[in-house]
Amino acid sequence: MRALLSWRAAMGILFRSAAAGDLAALAELAGELGHPVAPAELLPRLERVLADPAQAVLVAEQTGTVLGWLHVQEFRALTSPPSALVVGFVLAEGARGRGLGRALLAQAEAWARARGLTS
């Protein structure tokens, strides 16, 4: 599994790459997104994503609790330059409305810029 992204703190929230230890929280939040999945079913998917340098799952964590996650990947098409595509994005119901989603999206944008993606 690829090394975790460096930790960043903003608003008292830690932003980092997801890890296998986050499975239960990722699965619970996926259910809030309308895609219920068991942690055991999610594990091989997460491992594949984390092993692919063209994808990232970023989490927002506060005091050990994952409040949200965002899955971003490089998108390549013949008709446009490479770009970043958000394919999953969810915040816990109690974490919404505080700017956390905007901050998590900014982390994904930083990931994209680091990869040379301009949109």
Image (cartoon, helix red, strand yellow):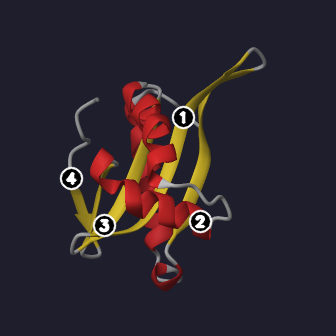
- Return the residue at label 1: 73
What is the secondary structure assignment of the residue under circle 1? strand
Which marked residue is nearer to the observer: mark 4 or mark 2? 2
Amino acid tagged 1: Gln
Q: Nearer the viewer, residue 117 or 42?
A: 42
**Dot placed on the residue nearer the N-terminal end, 3 or 2:** 2
**Side of 28 relative to 15 (left or right):** right
Amino acid tagged 4: Trp
Q: Nearer the viewer, residue 102 or 24?
A: 24
**Dot placed on the residue nearer the N-terminal end, 3 or 4:** 4
Amino acid tagged 2: Gly
What is the secondary structure assignment of the residue under circle 2? helix
Alpha-carbon span between mark 1 and mark 2: 21 Å
Q: Reply above or below: 84 against 33.
A: above
**Side of 76 relative to 71 (left or right):** right
Q: Residue at x 21, y 75 (%)?
A: 63
Q: Nearer the viewer, residue 86 or 115?
A: 86
What is the secondary structure assignment of the residue under circle 4? loop
Q: Quadrant of the C terminus?
A: top right
Which marked residue is nearer to the observer: mark 1 or mark 2? 2
Answer yes or no: do the residues labelled 3 and 2 have beta carbons within 8 Å? no
- Return the residue at label 3: 61
**Side of 49 relative to 3 (left or right):** right
Alpha-carbon span between mark 3 and mark 4: 10 Å
